[in-house]
Image (tube, rainbow, N blue to C red):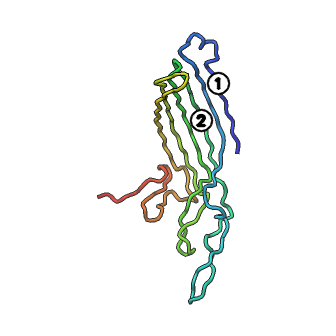
Amino acid sequence: FWSIGGMWNIKQEEFMFAMPEVNDMRLKVSYGTTGNSSIDNYLALGLISSGAVYDEINGTVIGNPANPDLTWEVVKSFNLGLSTRLHNRMNFEIEYYNRITDNMLMSIPYSATTGYSSGWGNVGKMRNRGVDFQFSYDLFQSDRAVWTVYGNVSYNKSKILELYGSTTEYTVGNIGVVHAVDHRFGEFKMVEF
């Protein structure tokens, strides 16, 4: 996994010298990849479990189906942000992000003939886009204490771009959560009354 980023300290530019009320202003940009392996260890292996009883005899069974192709989920992330401090009291920060998740780790339904209801796989691609806005204001400042008020607002929109094979939609269990191409991740599909 890798990343690259840069920051432009706009306050250090000559055209900003005439604006003493602006204490700091920075433009940031970054792009990179991160990995996610947030599933249980050894799920790629067909592990054996004990405790199965057949004809009153204890035995062993394959506890989970093997998936030798299971790998890390990869998130490709682009961020662009602007932060500023005004009058040595107010801080503003706004950041746009676009994240593409490849090889998305998901539990997928199996045919009942396999003996398993589901298993883990790298089966999807999803996009998350959004904007984060943060604000803080120092109500009180002294040599010994600072009293600051913070606030933030975020907007995020996720969209599933691909699912496994030629699947365009599937429902998880009996809880009504639906994963569908061109829809948000984890939408609920309910019966209308």
Of 109 and 80, nearer the camera is 80
Q: Which mark is residue 69?
A: none
Residue 79's disc number: 2
- In this view, the residue farthest toward the top is 18
Rendering coords of residue 178 (x, y %): 46, 57
Choose the circle earlier in sequence order: 2 or 1: 1
Residue drawn at the location 69% of the way across and 39% of the way down: 3
Amino acid type, mark 1 = Trp
Q: Which residue is mark 1?
A: 8
The structure residue drawn at horizontal position 66% and vertical position 60%, both measured from the top left corner, is 70
Q: Residue furthest bottom?
A: 55
Quadrant of the image containing the N terminus: top right
Amino acid on which the number 2 mark rests in the picture: Asn
The x, y position of residue 67, in whole percent, is: 65, 65
SS class, disc 1: strand
Within 10 angstroms of label 1, few (less than 14), some, or many (20 or more) residues?
few
Label 2 environment density (alpha carbons within 10 Å; few <14, some 14–19, many ≥20)? some
Spatial CA distance of label 2 from label 1 is: 14 Å
Which quarter of the figure has residue 48?
bottom right
